[in-house]
Amino acid sequence: GAVVSQHPSRVICKSGTSVKIECRSLDFQATTMFWYRQFPKKSLMLMATSNEGSKATYEQGVEKDKFLINHASLTLSTLTVTSAHPEDSSFYICSAGSTSGRALGHEQYFGPGTRLTVT
Amino acid sequence: AQTVTQSQPEMSVQEAETVTLSCTYDTSESDYYLFWYKQPPSRQMILVIRQEAYKQQNATENRFSVNFQKAAKSFSLKISDSQLGDAAMYFCAYRSVDSGNTPLVFGKGTRLSVIA
């Protein structure tokens, strides 16, 4: 099946710094990517939807200036946590969907996630 | 907006036995997709099974099967011959048919323990 990678898998950063997380679709073109946040023992919370070449659509309550999302190509989306604080510590997961190729329109493929710890 | 409800925060099952995880959803759409995802301790989301709403036949994948009741908006997952590796968090999810641009709507999850 289609593969989605995330990098890094784990990152520790100091409060006030910025962290970039990459999400790549390895063998298909991802017209749409989704970013989720997951707290321990909780469900996935959708943060934003990004379509290639256009601005991301953020969910209510998600600060777009803090969580910058870029989807510049059909295989790469990035999430940058700006001026990170301890409350931003969480598990971030991306998923990718496509309307063509091996990934069918109704299927989404998940990356392995990134554990962010802000000290 | 669509909602997904999983009313069982935790379930347990003896190894080799059968367990059913419940899921209900609310939607005004007539066509959509339903999924069960497994999240083991590694936290990688793994698709277990999918159901297209326009199909009346219940989906089956080896030991995993669903009971899809469209009128009741119910989508339960049955795991037969449970194995230790089935222990994980299970999420029920809904997706509109609009291809490519709609995110999954997740339930809160059910943590499944398998007892040896």
Image (cartoon, rainbow, N blue to C red):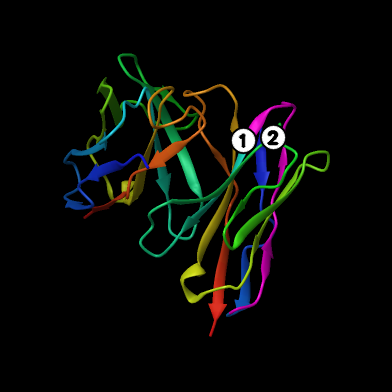
Q: Is mark 1 on a helix, strand or loop?
A: strand
Q: How far apart are marks 1 and 2 (CA)?
A: 6 Å
Nearer the observer, A70 or B35 = B35
Q: Residues within 10 Å of mark 2 (few under 14, many from 20)?
A: some
Relative to A109, does residue B17 appear above or below in the rendering?
below
Residue appearing at x 48%, y 46% in the figure? A44
Amino acid carrying mark 2 in the image: Ala
x and y percentages locating residue A108 in the rendered image: 45, 37
User: Marks 1 and 2: CB-CB under 8 Å?
Assistant: yes
Q: Residue furthest right?
A: B71
- Mark number displayed over residue B54: none
The answer to which quarter of the image holds residue B78 is bottom right
Q: Do labels 1 and 2 share a chain?
A: yes
**Which residues lie in the magenta part?**
B16-33
Q: In this view, does B44 lie to the left or right of B57?
A: left
Q: Residues within 10 Å of mark 1 (few under 14, many from 20)?
A: some
Q: In this view, does A68 lie to the left or right of B3?
A: left
x and y percentages locating residue A95 in the rendered image: 39, 38
Verify whether residue A18 appears in magenta. Answer: no
Verify whether residue B20 appears in magenta. Answer: yes
Relative to A23, does residue B112 appear above or below in the rendering?
below
Relative to B82, does residue A41 appear above or below in the rendering?
above
Residue appearing at x 61%, y 68% in the figure? B10
Dividing the image into 4 quarters, which one contains the N terminus of chain B?
Answer: top right
Q: Is residue A17 left or right of residue A32?
A: left
Tell me the residue that label 2 is attached to.
B53
Q: What element carries label 2?
A: loop
Residue appearing at x 63%, y 68% in the figure? B80
Chain ID for label 1?
B
Tell me the residue that label 1 is attached to.
B33
The answer to which quarter of the image holds residue A18 is top left
